[in-house]
Image: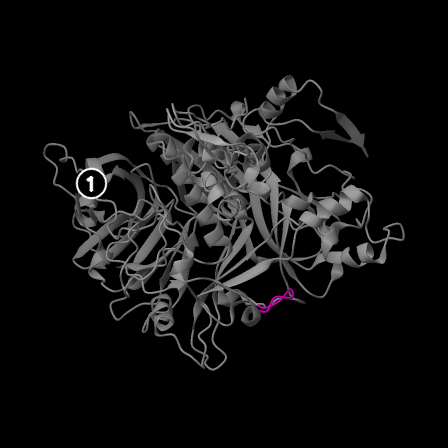
Amino acid sequence: MSKWGSPGSSTPGFTIQSPIDGARLARPVTLGTSGSQSITPRRTPGLQRIPYEIMGYIVEYLEIVEVFDLSLCGPHFQYLVREERFCKAIIADKASFTAEAREAERTGEYSRALRRVAKRHQALSQASPYVLGIVGLADSYEYIHGILCYIVESRPRRWLRILDLHGSAGCELVIDIPTLIHEAVPSSAKKRKYKFRVLYHAHGITSCLFSFALPDAENWLLIFKAEEQRIVAKVQLESTAKIFVRNNKDYLYFGTHSEEDADGFRKWVVTGLRMNDSFWFLQKIHLPTLVGYDIGSTVCFEIIDDYFYGLSNQTDFEIRETNWTSYYHCFRFPLDDPDPKKTQTMEKAYSWRRQHDEGPIDDRWGFLKLERDQASGRLHIIESRKEWLNGLSGSRRSYYITKVVFDSELDVSVKENSDTELSVVDGSTSDSTSIATGTSAPITPNIIGRPSTNPIGHLDKPAIPSARIRAEEDVHRGDESSVALLFTRSQTHLRAYERCCDTFLDLVDDPPITSSSRRLRLRTGYRKWNPIHNLVLSSGCLGGPNCGSSYETSKINEENRQPYQPNKIYFWPPEQKPSHRNPFLDKIYEILNPPGYLGRVDACSDERSLVYATGEDANGLKLLVYISFDPAARLSGMLREECMLGERAAGDGYNPEASTGGNITQNFGDYVAEGKGKQKVIGGYPPGALPFYVSDTPSTTTHTILPPPEGSRPWAWSEKAMYQDLTGKNFTFAR
């Protein structure tokens, strides 16, 4: 039996194949137990007659968004996104490492999880968010894994507020900072001038840096659980240079770029904490070979599963002027035993980054991160670089993807794949083994001279015989100065890349032509696999003299030779049309660009949302703007007036006016509501009302605050989220 199962069923007196199978009977049907009335049903043509199991095999070759699009082709295909057993198989195959999958494991609602993932990917790639709102006023903030931690310093009161935006929380934790530091560091009781900032928050554990200068400078790392009003640990720091914190529910590690080495360069040093008994590991982890100091640009640290990971895109402290090859330096060690002997380092065969003669790099645009594949769980290195490739006068932003592979994974993989083929090219070994966990796709290192059916264009002709060739799917070519509208670095306040939907995301300042005032907009670009490319490869026809007729030759152009279609660029909100202004669009721009808040923009994002702080008012407070691509996101009191979709930028033969007639809003009647039973068409809602399937009530879960230890003053409580007092500032674009 296929892994997709078979939902066919029969009942006494009424024998018919289930409509879920997508097929209708071609023979008469007998209705009733006594009578015999023959009815010849109308035959369903085309794809709608494909059996359930065959459709399962087709779905295996589709992306999750394509499955969702297929379900919209007609009612016969609705089972693709509504039949729980079928959806469970799709989620397990294509999105098993997502938050939606984890929720579905608890609730059993796999169909909802599939629709949510597909809509999120589509919304992100086409710059069409579901929720927009102002969620607070703050002096400073951090946005970590969907948790907003922001500090409001209304002296003498200083509060830290923690709001779960991914969980659509309607209440937030509030921490009284003066009381907290008095309980943690009693010697600071009389200090009035100090600095307090959030470093990290995960699994209900918050880490903060507390510093004061009189009479002597002291820096403390405070680690606490607000819901338990318990200070887990505190430690006085020798240095705070480039300090970072990472933790899960069992272990915490922090590091600083503070160790002076004999060569005169500073190095990283990391210290670990075991949570259950607040035990600090006696042995510090020294990282003398980890080059780089700018977290997020040249180095990256993460805790994933049971390992601490470190990553750098630099390999030498000295600047080399001669021919050089750059490699990633990636390592990990187990959280429960930070022993240098157990540290694993990624081999050079799998960690090649670039050759210097590919061209110079503009370091201002770069970012570096580790990301887990949502389907297989495999880790990947994601790096963005702006380069002048092969001596060209124009620069290009590109996004590079490298699989993370360690020896232990290779050893397990080799044992499970006895037919592994090894080939030696120019003295290098090519290994097609697979990681034991995740999918069975081969791990292919960036091997010297590795054959490729269609190498990336700008590396098609290596400058030297030993140049590496990257796989097409491992390079996403972004903006190119010769063909794309460019924004300066000062106009680009956020740069991100989400591999789950092959999309880059920017928050840009795009002033209108008629004004020089700031206008923040989202800008996305996503790529899609070119299906014609596979036909070209299978036919062996690349536009040469052996391609057959002139018709075939005309169809196979340079674009069809590329494995991916050109990037589709979207902006949101759409342009305001001078000829017919949309008042609602003015409201959206007013939230994104609040009047009176025109200072520095500080933004951060993840795979489902982004938050940015803009400007300062007379009291020094910044507005926090929240944008979510998750269709399940909620904010209390949110309104719906129009469905504002992303606007595709002109280019690549696309004419927005010809395609949409200039219409920037979406007709609600074109959408089908989700719900049990019969599908209903959305429409006829008065302005400001929400569809029946969308609730403006966020999560009603309240924080249970335990009393503090005996003899201690309470310093944490739960209250209504600040954003609920900012009425009329939250909108949903439910569709």
Start-end of magenta stretch? 650-655
Residue 129 appears left or right of 394: left
In the rendered image, the quadrant that contains the C terminus is bottom left
Q: Is residue 357 left or right of residue 34?
A: right
Count the marks.
1
Q: Residue at x 76, y 38 (%)?
A: 448
495 relative to 102 in the view: left or right: right
Residue at (67%, 67%) from the top-left corner?
482
Give 65 or 561, whichever is nearer the viewer. Answer: 65
What secondary structure characterizes most of the magenta part? loop
Res 458 quadrant in image? bottom right
Residue at x 45%, y 32% (from the top left corner): 18
Q: Would residue 453 be visible to someone looking at this image?
A: no
Secondary-structure class at tag 1: loop
Residue 344 image point, x, y percent: 56, 28
Check the image and report above or below for 119 versus 507: above
Check disc 1 and report the residue beneath it: 703
Image location (x, y in percent) of residue 499: 54, 46
379 relative position to 106: left or right? right
